Image (cartoon, helix red, strand yellow):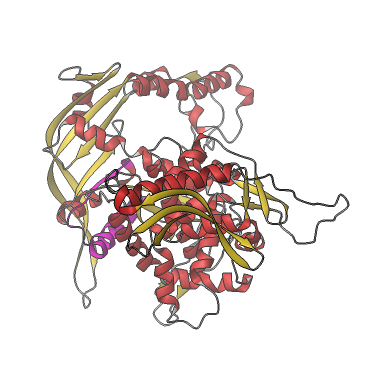
């Protein structure tokens, strides 16, 4: 319907609501409501145009609801065409809305002009990112399923593979660009950052080879896929991924390292790049005890940055243990939860390089004194959890003591530490000497239970209260959750790419996918988990029922709220192809 303004010979304007319709080849209009002269209506309404535009919209909505039923003709014996995809996903439109809000399409379109490509880089990236969220698979399987979306992905499988090294080439530029887009569109809290490292396995048998200079013998480039300590205990070669995230759980940047890289050495290089590229003056890094090394602390303090690191109380000095276990000065923050803090000075041993190119650089250990705030926490919940997790090892140890014949050459290390009378390798569990008279090591159990429920947080932020430090550290669970989302929901492992460029491109698409999902969490008020949002988007699919009509068969509160947040109507049971195209097109006009 339209609000029609009809100029009359007397100079006045007459308003009416009309409905256009086609009569053969001619377009005619039917008057639905005659409203009167504009100058007269202005005496009654402050803004008659706006008022009657609203009335017109309400009438149009009512008319649509009263449309006659649609008849669709189908033939019972009609066969499915080979290669035809009758069911398509519409949930990707929510991802598309954020993709275009971040202007990723503009980023790749600007760089597309510098390359003689006959396909769209942005289109390839969209397919890889959308499929990583909705239907994780190999690059080949992803391309084969590209018809399962209400969007045209007009490029070949070879185009997909050709795009991977290009994505890898622009990786640093895109990450920096995304940081600016996040700041612009959603706000970025980058003064406090969370950092953690995980690894991803590849189903191959041997490590990647290093590239070595034949003359000097120096390593020119290191192979990425290397065997190391896997988080999921698989024996396959790995790559290590360090992820930096802000307090809103939005990823900032990431780094990829060989799988045999020690986690603790990855922090400072990532921070140095972020501060340089993103023009951030100071960062306070929150991380677990893996990053709590003397070298990391010294490097952070030297650059004017800060840290909030957890610390193992079992491996702490006797003085720190004595202070932590003392019941004095604890204050209660909640039921079964207490905390106390202090300012302490301690000495750390740091590694420094001395020398120059002529004499050669040599590593040397130096002592540095630092002052920090230490916050000790006791939690009854963590106490019970520690005892419960230890119980299976205790039961197994007692079972082996009762039945020594079950003791084999390779002993379970978790149980072995509670058995006296045997000598074994603590790293492998290998029994080094023959069986002796076995007994349960009660003293070891008592010593371990002393520390149950306690943990210490050390920080450079001495002006902060104990509760503030604790709240900062508690946010670390968000990055652990991000890794779970990446591994479980986005199925980033195992990866099926092999070249360094392919590996980099793979994890770039995972990073972009994670960022978009996290933004959707934020847009829906953090009411739903990433897994719930992904499941809803996956199920928002329609089946072609004839002519140009699709029928959708899933709706829930998650999908409704997702639609409200992204401006997409996921409530319709039946949609025309044209309506769907307009909905998808609207997500690109952000």
Q: Is 128 on the left or on the right of 38, as rendered? A: right
Which residue is at 32% across, 44% downward?
A: 248
Q: Quadrant of residue 249?
A: top left
Which residue is at 45% across, 69% downward?
A: 168
Q: Is 245 on the left or on the right of 470, as rendered? A: right
Res. 324 in view: yes
Foreground residue among 173 and 225 = 173
In this view, 185 is above or below 317: below
Foreground residue among 230 and 552 = 552
**Main SS of the magenta segment?**
helix
Foreground residue among 2 and 527 = 2
Q: Is residue 550 within the magenta segment?
A: no
In this view, 182 is above or below 222: above
Q: Is 50 on the left or on the right of 284, as rendered? A: right
Q: Is 50 on the left or on the right of 152, as rendered? A: left
Q: Residue furthest right?
A: 77
Q: Quadrant of residue 237?
A: bottom right
In this view, 294 is above or below 332: below
Foreground residue among 480 and 522 = 522
Res. 228 in view: no
Which residue is at 18% across, 30% downward?
A: 466
Position of residue 500 measured from the top left corner of the image (x, y, whole percent): 49, 68
Position of residue 491 measured from the top left corner of the image (x, y, whole percent): 55, 49
Q: Which segment is the magenta one?
A: 263-289
Quadrant that contains the C terminus = bottom left
Position of residue 10 measured from the top left corner of the image (x, y, whole percent): 34, 63
In this view, 522 is above or below 135: above
Position of residue 206 measured from the top left corner of the image (x, y, whole percent): 58, 60
Q: Is residue 274 within the magenta segment?
A: yes
């Amino acid at each position: 319907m339209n609000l029609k303004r009809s100029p009359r010979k007397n100079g006045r304007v007459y308003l009416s609501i009309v409905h256009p319709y086609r009569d053969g080849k001619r377009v005619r209009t039917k008057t639905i409501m005659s409203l009167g002269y504009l100058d007269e209506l202005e005496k009654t309404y402050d803004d008659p145009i706006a008022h009657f535009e609203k009335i017109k919209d309400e009438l149009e909505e009512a008319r649509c609801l009263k449309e006659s039923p649609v008849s669709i003709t189908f033939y019972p014996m009609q066969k499915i065409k080979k290669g035809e995809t009758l069911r398509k996903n519409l949930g990707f439109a929510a991802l598309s809305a954020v993709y275009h809000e971040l202007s990723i399409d503009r980023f790749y379109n600007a760089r597309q002009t510098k390359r003689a490509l006959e396909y769209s880089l942005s289109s390839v990236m969209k397919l890889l990112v959308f499929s990583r969220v909705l239907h994780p698979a190999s690059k080949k399987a992803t391309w084969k399923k590209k018809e399962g979306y209400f969007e045209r992905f007009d490029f070949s499988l070879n185009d997909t593979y050709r795009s991977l090294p290009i994505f890898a080439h622009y990786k640093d530029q895109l990450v920096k660009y995304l940081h600016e887009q996040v700041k612009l569109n959603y706000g970025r809290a980058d003064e406090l950052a969370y950092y953690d490292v995980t690894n991803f396995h590849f189903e191959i048998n041997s490590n990647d080879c290093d590239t070595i200079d034949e003359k000097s013998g120096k390593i020119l480039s290191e192979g990425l896929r290397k065997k190391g300590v896997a988080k999921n205990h698989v024996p396959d070669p790995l790559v290590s991924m360090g992820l930096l995230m802000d307090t809103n759980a939005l990823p900032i940047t990431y780094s990829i390292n060989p799988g045999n890289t020690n986690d603790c050495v990855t922090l400072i290089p990532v921070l140095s790049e972020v501060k340089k590229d993103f023009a951030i003056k100071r960062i306070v890094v929150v991380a677990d005890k893996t990053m709590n090394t003397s070298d990391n602390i010294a490097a952070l303090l030297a650059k004017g940055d800060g840290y909030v690191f957890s610390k193992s109380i079992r491996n702490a000095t006797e003085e720190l243990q004595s202070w932590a276990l003392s019941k004095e000065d604890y204050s209660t923050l909640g039921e079964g939860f207490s905390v106390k803090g202090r300012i302490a000075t301690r000495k750390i041993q740091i590694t420094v390089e001395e020398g120059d190119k002529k004499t050669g650089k040599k590593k040397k250990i130096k002592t540095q004194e630092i002052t920090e705030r230490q916050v000790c926490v006791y939690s009854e919940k963590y106490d019970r959890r520690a005892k419960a997790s230890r119980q299976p090892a205790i039961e197994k140890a007692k079972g082996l003591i009762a039945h020594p014949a079950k003791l084999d050459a390779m002993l379970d290390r978790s149980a072995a530490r509670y058995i006296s009378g045997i000598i074994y390798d603590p790293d492998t569990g290998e029994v080094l000497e023959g069986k002796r008279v076995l007994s349960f090591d009660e003293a070891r159990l008592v010593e371990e239970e002393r520390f149950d429920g306690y943990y210490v947080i050390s920080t450079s932020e001495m002006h902060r209260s104990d509760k503030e430090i604790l709240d900062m550290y508690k946010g670390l669970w968000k990055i652990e959750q991000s890794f779970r989302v990446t591994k479980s929901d986005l199925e980033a492992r195992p990866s099926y790419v092999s070249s360094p460029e392919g590996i980099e491109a793979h994890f770039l698409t995972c990073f972009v996918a994670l960022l978009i999902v996290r933004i959707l969490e934020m847009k829906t008020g953090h009411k739903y988990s990433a897994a719930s949002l992904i499941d809803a988007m996956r199920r928002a699919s329609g089946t072609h029922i004839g002519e140009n009509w699709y029928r959708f068969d899933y709706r829930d509160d998650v999908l409704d709220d997702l639609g409200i947040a992204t401006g997409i109507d996921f409530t319709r049971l039946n949609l025309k192809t044209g309506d769907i195209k307009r909905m998808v097109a609207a997500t690109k006009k952000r």
